[in-house]
Image (tube, coloured by chain):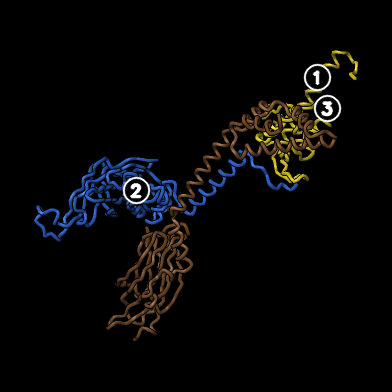
């Protein structure tokens, strides 16, 4: 059994950060872009997600100057976060594989578009 | 990735502070700049009276003297010697420190080793007989004291001569700890202890025969 | 609703956060809203409309605040505060001079500059500076110098020495050193000294015979015996 479970919002944010370090607004934009607007969360609720990941030790934050001159808070996935992501991905894959298998068998061979 | 200006979260901040605290406490303890534990004061007393590899056999409290109200007494066994010491705690004076000690030699194979500890303050004083019995034949002991005859006018001797008088032991002196027999008992002190010239301890077997006689080393501390 | 009122509403729900954490959250939210508004304004929106649209996407400020507050555990804050109190206490103790720096100082001084703790008359009594170190038990016996003088009919040897623990953090034992002349007989004499828990300095005057090449320091403990010869110089002794 998993030691730590994360919700799907945290999983999505974590998988984005696995690619590169990002700041808050950038995460919102990327999430919408890559999921073709399927996942569009209320922007304010991103921050509880990020701070929760930070508390869990899955991400760490640092400050960097933005082109506008303002200081931006960037988030970086940690080694612990990478391992957590891998575990979650594996269980998601086996879960979705199981769902697909059940659906295929019940519809009797018809492939879903 | 250049991780400048890391934002510390609560956990990291807390762990950093605890690590700093632990490092400082360790440094202070190793350098004896501050001794937060009574065992450290015992080690210091052992260093001063040459007790090697000290191990505390028994802790006890004796608050008779005002100065020992916040002290712990310890009977300490070492490789070739023993010690009775009183350690006190003062958080504003370096932590635990030794107040008084008395040592006993325990290397010559006689089977009976002892020392006498005396500590006085103003008009109060406490005394202890302590030691170790390695000879299994010895079941009881008797302590005597050689004093100047001025303390015993009924003896008829010249005041500068010496006379030997018995010393009352307040408790049963012998007890066992980890398979070894130790001596520890409070003794009755004479009022004018500066006339003391020495002590003698005799160990008797169960038939009442004297098995060993030694002259315990003694120290008198005056606060 | 404006940006400012949104931020204030979020902040008002953050009960568990410290001042510093609260301003960090404020800065992060403001930066986010500014980024979104700039993106909208780049698309041609007017500032007011951009703000309105942006706030629609932000979500309920009370809910955001509550969820954010939940992410801050009191446990680590308590641990952090407790550690800070202890550190402040140690700092206060350091300032009140409670740390035994005196002993450490004397311990180091005996090793590095022993003569700095020795009075002038002792220095004058020595006509041969030495530095003989001998481990004795858990301490080191360090002979600093010897001197000789002839007073009336008596030949006297003077030895100046110190003792300190082998560890710079240890205490010196209070065991006395005995003295023999070069014929193996006990040398009588007097002397003096001063000591701290860390180091003990002594000066001994021993009655010997003129021309004796050395005196012997004797250290005994529990059947263990160490002897150390201290050489004597007689050239300057004759006044």
- Residue situated in front as seen by the camera: B151 or A57: A57
**Mark nearer the viewer, 1 or 2:** 1
Given the image, what chain letter belongs to the residue carrying mark 3?
A
Residue B49: in sight, yes or no? yes
**Mark nearer the viewer, 3 or 1:** 3
Q: Secondary structure at mark 1?
A: helix
Given the image, what chain letter belongs to the residue carrying mark 1?
A
Discs 3, 1 touching: Cβ within 8 Å: no
Pointer 3 residue: A37
Which chain's colour is blue? B
Q: Residue at x 36, y 60 (%)?
A: C174
Which chain's colour is yellow? A
Pointer 2 residue: B86
Query: Which quarter of the figure is the N terminus of chain C placed in?
Result: top right
**Mark nearer the viewer, 3 or 2:** 3
Crowding at dot 2, Cα within 10 Å, few <14 / some 14-19 / many 20+, comes out as: many
- Residue situated in front as seen by the camera: A23 or B3: A23
> Can you give x and y, in whole percent of width and height, for residue B119 in the image?
28, 50
Above or below residue B101? Residue A1 is: above
Which chain's colour is brown? C
Badge 1 and badge 2 in a common chain: no
Q: Secondary structure at mark 3?
A: loop
Q: Residue at x 24, y 48 (%)?
A: B125
- Residue situated in front as seen by the camera: B16 or A94: B16
Identify the mark at residue A99; answer none if there is no mark: 1
Hey, which quadrant is residue B218 in on the image?
A: bottom left
Q: Secondary structure at mark 2?
A: strand
Q: Of all residues shown, which one is farthest toward the bottom?
A: C239
> Can you give x and y, in whole percent of width and height, for residue C169 in the image?
47, 57
Query: Which quarter of the figure is the C terminus of chain C placed in?
Result: bottom left
């Amino acid at each position: 059994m998993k030691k730590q479970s994360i919700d799907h919002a945290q999983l999505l944010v974590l998988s984005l950060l696995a690619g590169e370090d990002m700041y808050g607004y950038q995460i919102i934009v990327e999430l919408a872009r890559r999921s073709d607007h399927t996942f569009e969360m209320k922007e304010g609720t991103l921050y509880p997600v990020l701070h929760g990941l930070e508390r869990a030790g899955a991400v760490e934050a640092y400050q960097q100057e933005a082109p506008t001159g303002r200081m931006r808070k960037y988030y970086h996935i940690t080694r612990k976060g990478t391992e957590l992501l891998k575990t979650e991905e594996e269980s998601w894959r086996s879960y979705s594989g199981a769902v697909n298998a059940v659906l295929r068998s019940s519809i009797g061979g018809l492939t879903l578009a | 990735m250049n991780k400048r200006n890391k934002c510390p979260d609560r956990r990291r901040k807390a762990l950093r502070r605890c690590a700093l605290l632990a490092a400082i406490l360790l440094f202070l303890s190793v350098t004896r700049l501050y001794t937060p534990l009574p065992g450290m004061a015992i080690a210091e007393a052992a260093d001063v009276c040459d007790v090697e590899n000290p191990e505390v056999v028994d802790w006890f409290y004796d608050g008779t003297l005002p100065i020992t109200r916040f002290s712990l007494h310890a009977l300490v066994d070492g490789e070739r010697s023993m010690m009775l010491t009183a350690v006190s705690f003062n958080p504003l004076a370096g932590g635990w420190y030794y107040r008084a000690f008395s040592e006993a030699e325990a290397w010559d194979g006689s089977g009976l080793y002892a020392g006498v500890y005396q500590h006085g303050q103003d008009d109060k004083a406490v005394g202890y007989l302590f030691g170790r019995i390695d000879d299994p034949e010895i079941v009881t002991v008797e302590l005597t004291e050689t004093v100047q005859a001025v303390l015993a006018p009924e003896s008829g001797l010249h005041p500068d001569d010496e006379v030997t008088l018995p010393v009352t032991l307040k408790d049963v002196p012998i007890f066992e700890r980890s398979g070894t027999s130790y001596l520890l008992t409070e003794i009755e002190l004479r009022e004018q202890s500066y006339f003391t010239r020495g002590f003698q301890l005799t160990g008797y077997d169960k038939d009442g025969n004297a098995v060993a006689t030694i002259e315990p080393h003694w120290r008198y501390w005056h606060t | 609703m404006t940006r400012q009122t949104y931020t204030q509403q979020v902040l008002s729900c953050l009960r568990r956060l410290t001042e510093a954490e609260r301003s960090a959250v404020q800065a992060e939210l403001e930066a986010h809203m500014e980024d979104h508004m700039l993106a909208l304004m780049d698309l041609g929106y007017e500032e007011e409309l951009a703000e309105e649209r942006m706030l629609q996407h932000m979500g309920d400020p009370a809910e955001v605040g509550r969820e954010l507050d939940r992410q801050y555990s009191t446990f680590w804050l308590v641990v952090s505060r407790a550690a800070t109190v202890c550190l402040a206490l140690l700092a206060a103790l350091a300032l009140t001079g409670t740390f035994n720096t005196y002993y450490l100082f004397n311990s180091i001084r005996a090793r590095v500059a022993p003569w700095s703790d020795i009075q002038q008359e002792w220095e004058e009594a020595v006509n041969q500076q030495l530095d003989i170190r001998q481990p004795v038990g858990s301490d080191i016996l360090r002979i600093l110098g010897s001197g000789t003088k002839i007073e009336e009919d008596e030949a006297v040897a003077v030895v100046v020495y110190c003792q300190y623990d082998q560890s710079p953090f240890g205490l010196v034992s209070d065991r006395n050193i005995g003295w023999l002349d070069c014929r193996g007989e006990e040398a009588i004499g007097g002397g003096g000294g001063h000591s701290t828990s860390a180091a003990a300095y002594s000066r001994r005057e021993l009655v010997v015979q003129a021309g004796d090449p050395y005196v012997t320091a004797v250290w005994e403990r529990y059947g263990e015996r160490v002897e150390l010869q201290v050489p004597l110089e007689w050239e300057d002794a004759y006044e």
